[in-house]
Amino acid sequence: MLRQEQIMDKARELGFADVGITTAEPFDQQVEILKQRRDEYAWTKAAGLNLTGGVDPAKALPGARSVIVLLELYFKQAYPRELEPFFGRCYLDDDRVTKDGLAVRIRAFRSFLEENGIKAKFPHHLPQRPAAARAGLGDYGKNCLLYAKNCARGGSWVLPLPLVVDAEFTPGEPSMEVGCPDWCKNACLTACPTGALRGPRNLDPRRCISYLTYFGQGLTPRDLREPMGLYVYGCDRCQNVCPRNAPWLAADLEPNPRAAAKAGDFDLVKLLAMDVPYFKGRIWPHMFYMSAKDLWRWHMNVARVMGNTRDEAYVPELARSLDDNPDERARAMSAWALGRIGGVQARRALEARRGQESEMVRLEVEQALGMLG
């Protein structure tokens, strides 16, 4: 049987930032939290997310005795400046579709265990942050994220990866508390522009920018469009303002070559005009929460972002989208964006579409012209 030290050494040899162990006891506290916030998470069922399906490790692996938690530092290299303002960093080097990066190392670790007589399973719906906190790998931030104890200079740029195993090891000391200092003055709660963070470890996902960018249904509500700012997919707002993350943000990191290689594909103009083949070939392999049938949401998000840049250079692209996009939600947001940017060209584009569209688009065109005075 492998010794615990051998498991730790192998995890670090494979490039994981940290590793810890907790028991295979059910995550009862997580169940209670989800019961208390049933309304906020009701949407997850329709989205195919089974949040309670992994709370008992023994159901994932009969004979479960321990949970080994690998901690992946996903922000170990610098991302291109042209991507960071628009996309959450955790998606900028994501191989959950291509399976040619992190997935290779997870497979290697699991093979190492199984070759040494330990059955292991990696259930994707096991509570990841609670597992890491229970293993003593870090504590919580007020923004609900896990803050590392031994890597990322104590920051939150980590992804916990729990593996259920049928061998018993010595668990770490749990650290389930919020570890934020009093002097931070609730920076993350105050900075959340959509009011999704209602208090320490209390998030309404329905108002979270990340949720809105890839799970939001229908045309984005008007009161959220400006607060969502420049994020097309995901959000790092609460992490960027957090004092606990400042040390890592100040680090001099080498550029990430994988992210740099695809940066050109994520140009806003290309995203607004992309068709299904472009999406499937260049975008979906890296940011997969939305399928090709949700291409309208990508177009809508990009139009909103263009509007929030207030850059008149985007007016011709938005005018084309208002004319030609096959989805009324994307056309409606293009109208809003033109009104937000303003100017003579934007006015002409909006006036040309007056009275010629669906009720949704017609209303947005009129309101956009009203924004122009």
Image (cartoon, rainbow, N blue to C red):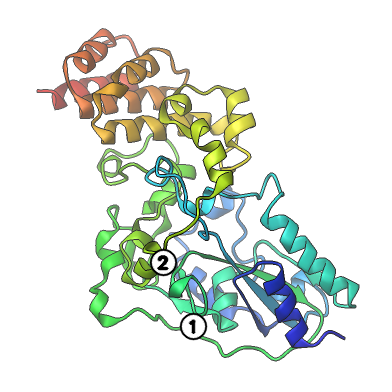
Q: Position of residue 149 (x, y in %)?
A: 49, 80
Horizontally, is 296 left or right of 291 in the view?
left
Location of residue 5 (image quadrant): bottom right
Q: Residue at x 51, y 56 (%)?
A: 77
372 sits to left or right of 100: left
Find residue 160 and report its horizontal and vertical position in percent. 59, 68
**How far from the left and from the top, in percent, is residue 323?**
37, 12
The N terminus sits in image quarter: bottom right
Query: Residue 7: percent from the left, percent from the top?
Result: 75, 80
Mark 1, residue position: 176
In the picture of the structure, the residue carrying the numbered disc 2 is 248
How many marks the image carries: the answer is: 2
Q: For the point 57% across and 48% down, which residue is it?
A: 46
Residue type marked 2: Trp
Answer whether residue 364 is visible to the viewer in this image: no
Whether residues under marks 1 and 2 lie with C-beta atoms below 8 angstroms apart, the answer is: no
